[in-house]
Amino acid sequence: MQSLAQLAQRVLPLVVTAGAAIAVPIMIFSPSGLSRLAALRQERSRADEEVARLSREIDRLRAEVARVKDDPAYVERAARDELGLLRQTEVVFQFRR
């Protein structure tokens, strides 16, 4: 029994080391290895850029909402430019080109 335990203590680390020496390169060069990691990093970078862009857009829209709530001149300008509205006292002249 003593010799079997000593043999196991000597052989087991060698078996684990050999298994790791074979398994690590296989895992690195497999399709789900380093190339997949690089692709995932690029995808994360694109997602981070999109999040930053959307955050800026949200900030811009919040500022516009605040202007609509607080600035009557801004509301009037938006109504004229975007909706084509006029005051009741205004007259519109249209010319053909």
Image (cartoon, rainbow, N blue to C red):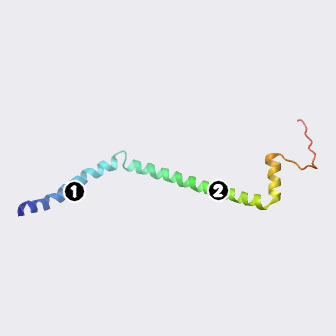
Residue at 81% x, 48% y: name it. Answer: 81
In the displayed orientation, state which residue is furthest to the top: 96
User: Which amino acid type is shown beneath numbered disc 1?
Assistant: Thr
Tag 2 residue = 58
Determine the secondary structure under disc 1.
Answer: helix
Residue 65, percent across and down? 72, 58
Q: Where does the image place residue 39, in percent across and percent down from the top left? A: 44, 48
Task: Name the mark on residue 17.
Answer: 1
* Residue 15 picture quarter: bottom left
Instruction: Indicate the position of residue 88 as horizontal and vertical percent values.
Output: 91, 49
Q: CA distance from mark 2 to mark 1?
A: 54 Å
Residue shown at 53% from the left, 52% from the top: 47
Residue count near mark 1 (Cα–Cα under 10 Å), binned few <14, some 14–19, many ≥20:
few
Give the crowd class for mark 2: few <14, some 14-19, many >=20 residues within 10 Å: few
27 with respect to 62 (left or right): left
User: Which quadrant does the C terminus fall into?
Assistant: top right
Hey, what amino acid is under mark 2? Answer: Ile
